[in-house]
Amino acid sequence: MAQSLRLSSIVTAVLGALAVFALSLPVLAASPKVGSPAPEFRLQDQTGKWVSLKDYRGKWVVLYFYPKDNTPGCTTQACDFRDDIFAFNRANAVILGVSVDDVNSKKDFAKEHSLPFAVLADSSKATTKTYGVLTSMLGLVEFSRRDTFIIDPQGRVAKHWEKVDADGHSKLVLNELKRLQGGA
């Protein structure tokens, strides 16, 4: 009887651990594949202006998803893109940052760090889900995984990085953009 009870406790513990692990997995795992059309979206930026992917047809787009405004890694990443903005402009590329924070959070984040590009509010999490980068912590709090997509002037995904390191990522993206454009 005691052995049966102990085995039951072990099975319950293992199943509980598996449930916690499953809850920490991405909510949607399917990101658009390289070469496929990038999913359209319509989101508000830090000023409340509506921004759509189709607004940038004919330009290269660096669409980066990040977990949360004003957190250390997200600030580092945004400021690195800010510091490289002139190089991205010369490459005919725009930068768009996306997280599930609201417009007011975006406004404060962009102002505090003098961000010269749009940071978009995906409060409904629809775009983050569509791009396959919505994740959660123990199934309690949903946020964007730190992924970056380069979208070509025709609106196709040209490159996708998953779970990137925020520090130095801007330079990596810029080098890949130049390579894709035939300049490196």
Image (spheres, rainbow, N blue to C red):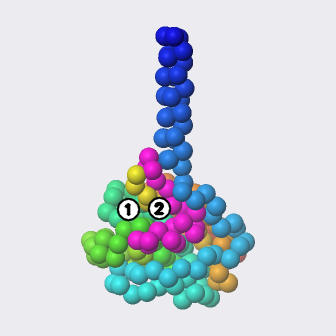
Judged from the image, the secondary structure of the residue bearing numbered disc 2 is strand
**Residue at 68% from the left image edge and 77% from the top image edge:** 37
Residue 137: horizontal and vertical position, in percent? 43, 49
On the question of residue 171 being in view, the answer is no
Residue range of the region highlighted in magenta in the rendering:
122-139
Does the stretch in magenta take in 132? Answer: yes
Cα separation, mark 2 vs mark 1, equals 8 Å
Residue 93: horizontal and vertical position, in percent? 55, 80
Q: Nearer the viewer, residue 10 or 31?
A: 10
Q: How many marks?
A: 2
Q: Please say if 4 is above or below 172.
A: above
- Residue under circle 1? 68
Q: Amino acid at mark 1?
A: Lys
**Residue at 61% from the left image edge and 76% from the top image edge:** 39
- Residue under circle 2? 144
Q: Quadrant of residue 66?
A: bottom left
Residue 20: horizontal and vertical position, in percent? 48, 41
Q: Nearer the viewer, residue 117 or 36?
A: 36
Q: Amino acid at mark 2?
A: Ser
Circles 2 and 1 in contact, beta carbons < 8 Å: no
Does the stretch in magenta take in 142? Answer: no
The residue positioned farthest toward the front in the image shown: 1
In the rendered image, which quarter contains the C terminus? bottom right
**Residue at 54% from the left image edge and 18% from the top image edge:** 7
Q: Please say if 4 is above or below 104.
A: above
